[in-house]
Image (cartoon, rainbow, N blue to C red):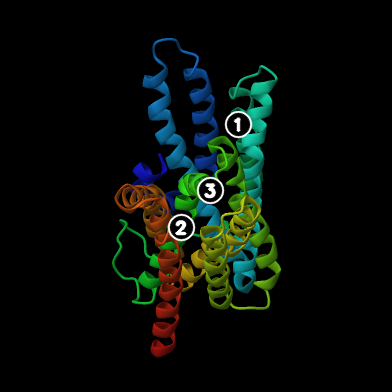
C-alpha cells in the first residue's frame, strides 16, 4: 500500500489548507483506526475477504502516510532548532514499535487469539491520538496551514531541496533493501538456516532504534548534516563487516552497526529537507513521501533484479553505493545553501 498510494499523500497539502494541520491529523488517525477495524472484520468475511481487505489496506496506507507527514512537519515547526533531535527521538519510538509489533502478533497467535487481536490494538491507540491532537488545536504549529495556498505543485522549491530529498530516498532504499534481502546474504555467507537468518534481520531494526536514541541528544549539539554524514560512515562500516564476514556472530554484529548508522538518516534527512524547502515544509514532506514510498518498493526490487543477474553477494555492493549517494546528496544541498547565502 505504501508505494502504490505514496503519490496520493500529495493531496494532504490541499487538505491541510482546508482543515489546518490539526484537522488533517485528527481525520487521518480516525480514518486509520476505522480502516484497521474494517480490515480485521473483513478478514472474517468468508468469500469476500480480498474484496474488503485489499481496498482497506490502501486506505490504511493513505491515512497512515498523512498522519506521519503531518506529525513530521508539526514536530519540526513546534520545536524549532530542537526539531531534528525531537524528530529523531520520535522515530526511535517508531522503530521500537517496529520491534515489538511482530512479537505482539506472535504472542497473540500462540495464545490462539490470532493476529487480529494484536492488530486491533491500533484502534484504541488511534482514538488516544485523536484525543491528544484535539487538545493541541491552539498550538501554532498545529493550527497553521501550509505556506502558499491553492492546489499542490512541486514547483517553487529552491535548488537546495532536491539533493536533500534524494538523499533521504537513497537512505530509505537502503533500509528496505536490507530488511527484505539480508536473510539471503546471511544464508549464503554463513550457512545458517533461512528461518534463523530471517529472525536475525531484526538486528537492523534494533540497531536503528538504538541509533536514533544515540543520535537524538547529539542532535542538540551537532548539526543534522554532520550527524547524517557520520551515520553514512557507520552504515558503510557495518555493511562491510556483514558482507565480508563468514561468521554468523560477526555478520549480525555488522547488521547491528549498520542499523545504528542508518537509524538517524531518515529523521535528520527529513529535517534537512524541510530546512531546504524555502519555507514550504508541508509540501517538502509531501513530495518526499512520494520518493520514500516508491524507494521502499523499488529498492528491494532493484536488489532482487541484480541478485538474479550477478548473485546475492555481488548485488549487495549496491548498498554502500546508495549510502554514499545519500551522503553526496546532503553535501550538495549544503554547498548550494552556502553558495546562495
Residue 256, above or below 46: below
Q: Residues within 10 Å of mark 2 (few under 14, many from 20)?
A: many
Q: x%, y% of residue 60?
A: 46, 36
> Which residue lies under the disc numbered 1?
123
- Residue located at (69% from left, 27% from top): 107
Give the mark nearer the N terminus: 2 vs 3: 2
Residue 37, above or below 204: above
Q: x%, y% of residue 161?
A: 39, 72
Which of the image's four quarters has the N terminus?
top left
Camera-nearest residue between 283 and 270: 270
C-alpha distance separating marks 2 and 1? 31 Å
Which of the image's four quarters has the C terminus?
bottom left
> Which residue lies under the disc numbered 3?
186
Camera-nearest residue between 220 and 125: 220
Camera-nearest residue between 184 and 161: 184
Q: Nearer the viewer, mark 3 or mark 1?
A: 3
Give the mark nearer the N terminus: 3 vs 1: 1
Residue 37, above or below 339: above
Q: x%, y% of residue 291?
A: 37, 56
The furthest residue to the top: 46
The local secondary structure at tag 2 comes to helix
Q: Which quadrant would residue 158 be assigned to in this image?
A: bottom left
Give the mark nearer the N terminus: 2 vs 1: 1
Camera-nearest residue between 30 and 217: 217
- Residue located at (54% from left, 40% from top): 29
Determine if residue 137 is in view. no
Disc sitting over residue 174 in the figure = 2
Amino acid at each position: 500500500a505504501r508505494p502504490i498510494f505514496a503519490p496520493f499523500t500529495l493531496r494532504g497539502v490541499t487538505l491541510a489548507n482546508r482543515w489546518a494541520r490539526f484537522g488533517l491529523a485528527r481525520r487521518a488517525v480516525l480514518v486509520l483506526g476505522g480502516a484497521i477495524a474494517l480490515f480485521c472484520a473483513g478478514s472474517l468475511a468468508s468469500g469476500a475477504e480480498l474484496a474488503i481487505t485489499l481496498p482497506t489496506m490502501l486506505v490504511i496506507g493513505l491515512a497512515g502516510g498523512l498522519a506521519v507527514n503531518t506529525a513530521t512537519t508539526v514536530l519540526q515547526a513546534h520545536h524549532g532548532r530542537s526539531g531534528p533531535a525531537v524528530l529523531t527521538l520520535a522515530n526511535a519510538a517508531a522503530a521500537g514499535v517496529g520491534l515489538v509489533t511482530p512479537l505482539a502478533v506472535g504472542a497473540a497467535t500462540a495464545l490462539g487469539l490470532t493476529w487480529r487481536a494484536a492488530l486491533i490494538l491500533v484502534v484504541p491507540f488511534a482514538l488516544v491520538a485523536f484525543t491528544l491532537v484535539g487538545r493541541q488545536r491552539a498550538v501554532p504549529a498545529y493550527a497553521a496551514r501550509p505556506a502558499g495556498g491553492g492546489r499542490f505543485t512541486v514547483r517553487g522549491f529552491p535548488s537546495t531541496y532536491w539533493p536533500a530529498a534524494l538523499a533521504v530516498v537513497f537512505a530509505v532504499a537502503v533500509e528496505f533493501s536490507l530488511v527484505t534481502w539480508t536473510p539471503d546474504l546471511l544464508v549464503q555467507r554463513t550457512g545458517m538456516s533461512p528461518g534463523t537468518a530471517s529472525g536475525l534481520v531484526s538486528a537492523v531494526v534494533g540497531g536503528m532504534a538504538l541509533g536514533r536514541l544515540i543520535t537524538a541528544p547529539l542532535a542538540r549539539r551537532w548539526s543534522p548534516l554532520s550527524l547524517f554524514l557520520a551515520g553514512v560512515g557507520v552504515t558503510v562500516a557495518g555493511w562491510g563487516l556483514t558482507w565480508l564476514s563468514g561468521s554468523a556472530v560477526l555478520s549480525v554484529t555488522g547488521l547491528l552497526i549498520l542499523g545504528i548508522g542508518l537509524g538517524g538518516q531518515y529523521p535528520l534527512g527529513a529535517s534537512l529537507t524541510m530546512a531546504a524547502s524555502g519555507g514550504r515544509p508541508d509540501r517538502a514532506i509531501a513530495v518526499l513521501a512520494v520518493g520514500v514510498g516508491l524507494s521502499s518498493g523499488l529498492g528491494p526490487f532493484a536488489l532482487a533484479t541484480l541478485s538474479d543477474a550477478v548473485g546475492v553477494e555481488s548485488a549487495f555492493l549496491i548498498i554502500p553505493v546508495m549510502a554514499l549517494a545519500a551522503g553526496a546528496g546532503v553535501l550538495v544541498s549544503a554547498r548550494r545553501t552556502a553558495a546562495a547565502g
